[in-house]
Image (cartoon, rainbow, N blue to C red):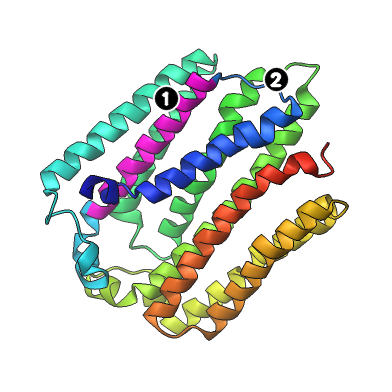
Amino acid sequence: MEILKLIRWKNLLMIALTQYLIKYAFFEPFGVNITLNLFGFSLLVLATLCIAAGGYVINDIYDVETDLINKPDQVIVGKTISEQAANNLFIAFNVIGVGIGFYLSHLVGKSAFFATFIIVSGLLYVYASYLKPMPLIGNLVISAMVALSIIIVGLFELIPAITPGNQETQLTFFTILWDYALFAFILNLLREMIKDIEDIDGDHKAGMNTLPIAIGRERAKKIAFAVSFIPLGGAIYYLINYLYGNMVAVVYFLVAIIAPMLYIVIKIFMAETKKEFHFISNMIKLVMLLGMLSLIIYKYSLLD
């Protein structure tokens, strides 16, 4: 059970759900040409989850000092799981993830895609060991990794199946997937900024130099407040320009995405305590999940 907590099983479940939704709720209902069967796609999901799990493990290894201050009841490394065991898990997850990535890259005839798994694995280590304490840079890197977990489905499913006859359709679906990845990137960046404000005390004592430490808590909150308008504006723009003619899509976006984002914007403006910022962080994660679930409604939208 402690290992499941260490690898953030709930976050991994969300990644897997998102990737399966892309394939079975977004690609297949429209008859898009795809590359992998269920077994091959499940291997892609497994590879993604293994590398993500490795990232969570190495992050906790390097975060023990700050976590003892910010969330002492949730510290696992050094308490219920030794640092050596955690390092072994990190290595094992990455070996499995990169190994599956090597197999899949050759399976789809795109051996260069193998580099994606190597780069992500390396970046997650560099993030935990070096980039995380730096203002914004660490936030941008980890948010890019979140976006890549969406884009990688298009890389392995759509790109290898492109032919002269279906190129326009394949690229259209890849573009929509890119929009979702950008939405996830911005939301996760906002969440990382909020978490840095929430954890400012522990991070400061650990000698980190996150954005709220570098420029002050209030200035960081103002920047997060400004950033929160980007996903809100993006959702409104998407609704007006692509989904406005379909009532199901309109209602879903208004209720499940735009309304919660408006609430988040207001809460960021008013937030003062650690508890309030923690609540905002969880709300952003919920909006990310609801945003991914919107893939289900596309078969009812104007795309068909």
Residue 162 belongs to the span the image colors magenta: no
Quarter of the C terminus within the rendering: top right
Q: Which mark is residue 257?
A: none
Residue at (83% x, 58% y) in the render:
240
Considering the numbered disc 1 on the image, is that residue within a helix, a strand or a loop?
helix
Q: Position of residue 237 (x, y in %)?
A: 78, 59
Residue 101's mark?
1
**Disc 2 marks which amino acid?**
Ile
> At numbered mark 2, what does the secondary structure look like: helix, strand or loop?
loop
Residue 258 in the image: x percent, y percent? 69, 65
Instruction: Specify the quadrant of the image occupied by residue 94.
Output: top left
Magenta part of the protein: which range? 38-60
Residue 302: name its quadrant: top right
Q: Which residue is mark 2?
A: 162
Near mark 1 (Cα within 10 A), the count class, few <14, some 14-19 or many ≥20, is many
Which residue is drawn at the image coordinates 40% and 30% (left, top)?
Answer: 47
How far, Cα to Cα, is label 1 from label 2?
20 Å
| Percent of width and height locating residue 36 | 56, 20
Instruction: Check the image and report above or below for 54 versus 104.
Output: below
Does 288 appear above or below 25?
below
